[in-house]
Amino acid sequence: MRSIKYRELKRMYELCGPERCVEHLREAFDQGHLKAEDFSLRELAEATVGPGWVKQMDPRNGGVRLLESGDAVDVTAFSNIAGQIVYSKILDAYRREAFVMSQLVETVPTRLDGEKIPGIGPLRDETAEVRPGMPYPSVGLGEDYIETPTTTKRGFIVPVTREAIFFDRTHLILQRAGEVGEILGLNKEKRLLDLAVGATNNYRHNGTAYNTYYAAADNGPWTNVLQRELVDWTCIDAAEQLLADILDPVTGEPVIMQATTMLVMPAYRHAAASILGAAELVFGAETDMVRRTYANPYAKTYAFYESRLAYRRIMAAGQTAADAKKWWFLGDFSKAFAYMENWPITVTQAPVNSEAEFNQDIVVRFKASERGAAAVINPRYVVKCFVPHG
């Protein structure tokens, strides 16, 4: 734990101004020079507001008001700096490495509560030829489009009470802030995973709703379900062949993509590591007279991730533990799914001297919120693989 020089911090706040001071703190948190746990709310309050103000919070002075004799006490510096500390803790928990799908998908900023994303009108490669003296063809937005779902808002309030400051319960406030960030991050991850595993579907193309995954027996518009357990490199090859057969619905050409990611359940993390990490692959059956070995082409092609949360979401959708652990996925998740974000995780603080301060001894409150929706952008970029029950 670092020793914070609170007097110097207050002086920087006075010289640089609130915005610049908070920006410096944010940079220090982002670069790892500071941690939320390095701070003490009581010492911060004593340095920025004054020891006398903190002493008035003594519960033994229950009848004494925080603002005696009508004297104004400026707690702006304290609340602004404390807000950045709380925000840092919330953000760290919100971005936990365990939230795999949140890292793999693209975050798309949007100001709309669900939107219609147009595609390019039908183009074919033969239309690209321009003869001498002839005009170039124009590319416009056609009637091809997808619709993303309505966004939702989620959030919590983290209060800082007079007791928390007086008794210096900084660890408790930070624990609550971390829980807020973790819950918000967990909820986002679960919504994305439910789409990725096919537990929920919200893909709408040209006004028609589709499932994310179709098996060959479904006779759907594409096939991206493989009934195969992950045991060796031939399983990856089979998934790649499925992707190679998927056509773009507009042009009729193969979907242009580069599968880059494999998602497995915890029970198969060693299987994935051994397949992708093998130095060589063997081509040919054991009964063949000649079997060939060659450098593993998958070693630098795929990054694999495991997700305990995905495993739990598959079971929540009705699969047994024995079946759920065998599920795995291959493709480009950044093109298949997205998080449509109205605003990212944001922390705002309530005005000081509010009614909550008088009624509940809450000196300052911080509200954390985010708004967005998990969306299927193009399910043709990912293959779901599993072993049928029985």
Image (tube, grey):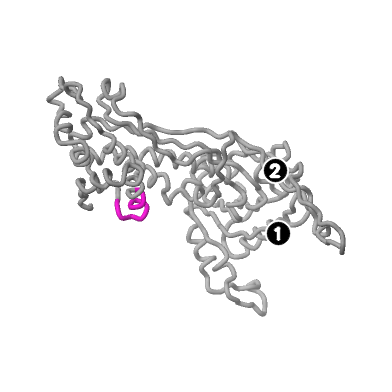
Instruction: Give how far across and how far down residue 67 sits, in percent.
Output: 20, 25
Instruction: Give how far across and how far down residue 129 sits, in percent.
Output: 83, 61
Q: Which residue shows up at 27% across the image and 24% down it?
A: 357
> Which badge, 1 or 2, comes first in the chain's sequence?
2
Q: Quadrant of residue 146?
A: top right
Q: Judge whether residue 28 is colored magenta.
A: yes
What range is drawn magenta here?
26-34
- Residue tagged 1: 244
Relative to 167, does residue 100 appear above or below in the rendering?
A: below
Q: Which residue shows up at 75% across the image and 47% down it?
A: 140
Q: Nearer the viewer, residue 78 or 104?
A: 78
- Of tags 1 and 2, which is closer to the observer? 2
Left or right: 100 with respect to 338? left
Badge 1: how crowded within 10 Å, few (<14), some, or many (20+)?
Answer: few
- Per the image, label 1 sits on a secondary structure element best described as helix
CA–CA distance in space, label 1 to label 2: 25 Å
Q: Amino acid at mark 1?
A: Ala
Left or right: 3 with respect to 325? left
Relative to 163, does residue 201 appear above or below in the rendering?
A: below
- Residue tagged 2: 118
Q: Which residue shows up at 25% across the image and 32% down it?
A: 74
